Amino acid sequence: MRVFLSAILTSLFVSLPLAASADVITERQANFSASGKSLRMIGGAIGEGNFAFIEAEAAKLAKWADMMPEFFPAGSESPKASPDIWTEFEQFTQLTADFGAAARALGDAAVSKDASLVKARLGEVGQTCKSCHWRYRSR
């Protein structure tokens, strides 16, 4: 079941091209939803000791982080996205890079098979999400 869900999440993370603004918004919302599901599945996989799964999901999160700025072109404003994203795009891009670095560190921790370290790194990934959402997600 996890493999099937993982395949679905992968397809969501890499859905391209980014055509019209409405398509970009739909795609980025799908990617954010997929990343949230991925994080929840990683949490469950820690208890199962499924470190290979965690490593694979962390790689998908890192890939999404690398691609994320492309999903916020000018003209793709939406109710959930703060207008500050476009006026502070450099800072926004830095936060996406922080998310990517945290996701890569999570993947590295999964290779170590140290559940405590994986939990700590998962918490760091969550913090990067929160810091960006706090600043750039409209409520």
Image (spheres, helix red, strand yellow):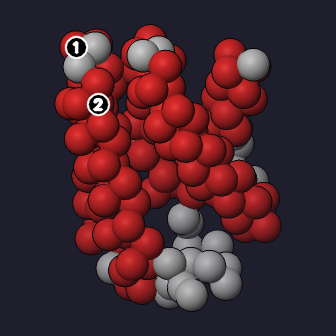
Instruction: Give the residue type that dot 2 points to.
Output: Val
Circle number at residue 112: 1
User: Mark 2 — residue?
Assistant: 118
Residue 81 in which image quadrant: bottom right
Is 121 in front, or is 11? 121
Total marks shown come to 2
| Residue under the point 54% across and 85% down | 138
| Residue under the point 38% across and 67% down | 130
| Residue 29 horizontal/vertical position (percent) | 68, 60
- Cα gap from disc 2 to disc 1, whole angstroms: 8 Å
| Residue under the point 67% across and 84% down | 79
Q: Secondary structure at mark 2?
A: helix
| Residue 42 horizontal/vertical position (percent) | 49, 33
Q: Secondary structure at mark 1?
A: helix
Q: Is residue 2 left or right of residue 117?
A: right
The residue carrying pointer 2 sits among few (fewer than 14), some (14 to 19) or many (20 or more) residues within 10 Å by Cα, namely: many
Pointer 2 with pointer 1, Cβ within 8 A: yes
Q: Is residue 68 above or below residue 54?
A: below
Instruction: Give the residue type that dot 1 points to.
Output: Ser
Quarter that holds the C terminus: bottom right
| Residue under the point 72% across and 27% down | 5
Confirm whether residue 101 shows in the render: no
Nearest to N terminus: mark 2 or mark 1 = 1
Quarter that holds the N terminus: top right
| Residue 20 horizontal/vertical position (percent) | 77, 61
Residue 13 in which image quadrant: top right
| Residue 115 horizontal/vertical position (percent) | 29, 25
